[in-house]
Amino acid sequence: MARIAVGGFQHETNTFAPIKASFDKFERPDAWPGLCQGERLLSSVDGVHIPITGAVDHFRLSGHDIVPLVWSSATPSAHVQEDAYERIVGMMLADLKAALPVDGVYLDLHGAMVCAHFEDGEGELLRRVRALVGPDIPVSVSLDLHANVTEEMVRYADALDIYRTYPHIDMGETGARAARHLEIFMSTGGRWAKAFRRPDFLVPLNFGCTDIDPAKGLYEKALPRALAGGGTTAAALAMGFPLSDIAAVGPSLVVYGDSQSGVDAVANDFLDALTKEEARFGDRIWQPDEAVAEATRLAAGSSRPVVLADTQDNPGGGGTGDTTGMLRALLAAKTEGAVVGLFNDADSAEKAHRAGVGAQITLQVGGKLNPGDSPVTVEGRVEKLGDGRFVGTGPMWGGANYEMGLCALIDVDGLKVAIASKPEQTGDQSMYRHLGIEPSEMKVIALKSSVHFRADFAPIAEAVLTVAAPGPVYVDTGALDFDHIRPGVRQWPGTD
């Protein structure tokens, strides 16, 4: 039986977003638990579909002694503030130091954390962990598919494993794989040879979805080929998070195996397969007015809803969750049988609660957080109120204990406007059911998400349209002004 320290620190940083991540953002729960430490970590993550839960469950089944450190996450946003980073990392390292000696360390990280004082939050954390435990204690890490993997992450961790699905329905599995890697290191005392590669282009956030090509083929064909390579012990592919303005931004791959020559050969072939797909990472993006018109046309001939993805205001990519472009288009078209949201607007939710169910109310919805936007005046009836506490039911957020604060549903001449008090991408049908909406019965669903919603909403949808209403989760990475990207990287696939 081994003694294993486990912890996690998750943030996906959109450096183009307007709001930074302060310490309190990591303290409070949303869909995932708030900052938790020690034994409370184990009870907080139990049954929740996140990587650390998969790792802990595996270690328990193997009979290991688990030493919980700190786990925390915050909704994606701009840079992690220095105070937040140093306080959380300080807590983790203090707990790890007090726990020594340990036989291994497992960490649940994202891989795209940018701090106010470090471009590479995870690489710096791993450097500090390695300095504390020394060169002989194995360190295994799970990462998000949108990790911007750096040379420092590869250097200081003995193994990095990465989600293979987007929507991320394999988070627990990835944590369990990372746990198995750690067991191998602890039992053999050996380490694997490593090969790390990066292509010279970015993959726009929407088009790394593994339900569609080319990402689907890369994960279903190229990755298995790499894993089957001679002497390969593990391999992982990241699509990168293209909204982080850092040198290491973009897709990458890492291959582990018995020999350096072997992993180099496999990695070169894997990189070639990835590079050949560059020009295929793209598809149509709709403007709000035309998307509403097309959704209305499609819904008229179907019993299934049409889903409009308000991708550029996705809180899961750094959006504020309160931009109004999609709402304005639906109101202008006098759309009925539709629901839009969930808006991050605590003020409007509180006013609806004060008014009560059935009350006629005028609200200034959204438009309060993103520069250049402004609230929309809506007049409607308070149809449903909620406390924001419910359990996720879909493939990605199943078991998540949502804490969204006060929530409200306002009926505006047949258009349902769903409002919450915290930013969270609308990726699970439970978010609407909490407010009395059965998604499958709607004609049009306009939701604030980029891709994750597909896991729970695509099976009920007649069609899915990706819409570029104004917001900071930019679809067109080619239009962004990067200051720190490494030379020669193409910001939009297939372009110079």
Image (cartoon, helix red, strand yellow):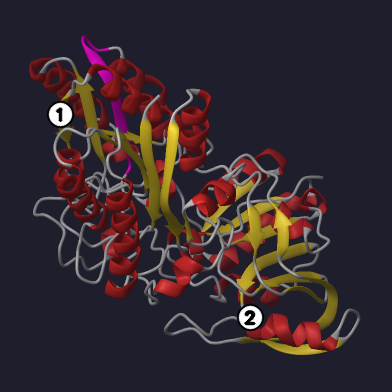
Q: Kindly state the secondary structure of the residue where label 1 is placed.
A: strand
Residue 232 counted in the magenta span: yes
The label number, if any, that marks residue 195 in the structure image? 1
Q: Is residue 399 above or below residue 31?
A: above
Measure the alpha-carbon separation of dots 2 and 1. 47 Å
Give residue 223's position: percent from left, percent from top.
Answer: 33, 23
Give residue 61's position: percent from left, percent from top.
Answer: 53, 24
Give residue 359's position: percent from left, percent from top.
Answer: 88, 85
Q: Amino acid at mark 1?
A: Ala
The label number, if any, that marks residue 346 in the structure image? 2
Q: Residue at x 22, y 49 (%)?
A: 129
Q: Look at the image and tell me in which quarter the N terminus lies.
A: top left
Would you identify the image quadrant in which residue 118 lies?
Answer: bottom left
Q: Nearer the viewer, residue 496 or 379?
A: 379
Q: Residue at x 62, y 77 (%)?
A: 328
Would you identify the image quadrant in which residue 26 lies?
Answer: bottom left
Please rate how many residues cluster around mark 1, counting C-alpha atoms within 10 Å: few if below 14, some from 14 to 19, many from 20: many
